[in-house]
Image (tube, rainbow, N blue to C red):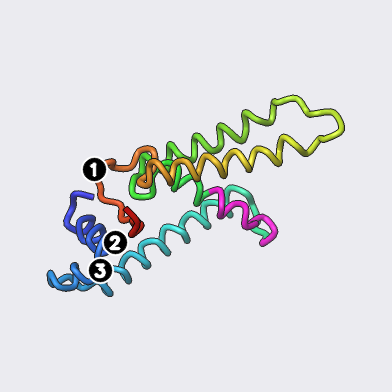
Amino acid sequence: MNAPFGRVLKGVREDEQAAQMLGKQTTLVKLQLFVIGGAIAGLAGAVYAHYVGSVVTGQFVPLVTFLVWMALLLGGAASNKGAIVGAFLLIAFRKSTRFLPEIEGHPSLIPSLRFVVIGLLLVLVVRYRPAGLLGNPNEIVTTRESDEP
């Protein structure tokens, strides 16, 4: 994020109007980022299809999207290391809870509680570390303050 393109991206993310006032073409920057993201997604899809052998739409359920989103928020959306750490922690938690013993008469209780705990963890991280676990703590995160004293 220290390269000129990274600084422009951060400027557009933080305040698009201010970046426009500084002479940056924010529409062009967003278009370039969309093209780069699409190219990476296309390449990832091709690698995935080659690895699996065939691609069926039933493989992609909304749960996958939510888990990726949670991993990004957990680790830090503006940090590559944070995304990796968030994904590692989320997968490690999900896989380690598979070994918990089942409660007699309630075989689906542990898998259900797994998502409750992940949701609570996400709420705590967003509340106390809005930039994520590895996000920059010095970065300003805008929040709404109440008008009450």
The foreground one among 100 and 27 is 100
Identify the disc placed on residue 13.
Answer: 2
Horizontal side of residue 42 vs 22, given as left or right: right
The residue drawn where x is 52% and y is 57% is: 46
Q: Residue at x 39, y 43 (%)?
A: 132
Residue pointed to by mark 3: 16
Is-magenta flag for residue 33?
Answer: no
Residue bearing the label numbered 1 = 138
User: Residue shown at 31%/69% (left/top)?
Assistant: 30
Image vertical order of residue 34 relative to residue 89, above or below: below
Q: Nearer the viewer, mark 1 or mark 2?
A: 1
Q: Amino acid at mark 2?
A: Arg
C-alpha gap between disc 3 and disc 2: 6 Å
Question: Residue 35: which quarter of the image?
Answer: bottom left
Question: Quadrant location of residue 148?
Answer: bottom left
Figure label count = 3
Number of other residues with Cα within 10 Å of mark 3, as a class: few under 14, some 14 to 19, many 20 or more: some
Relative image position of residue 97 (x, y in whole percent): 65, 30
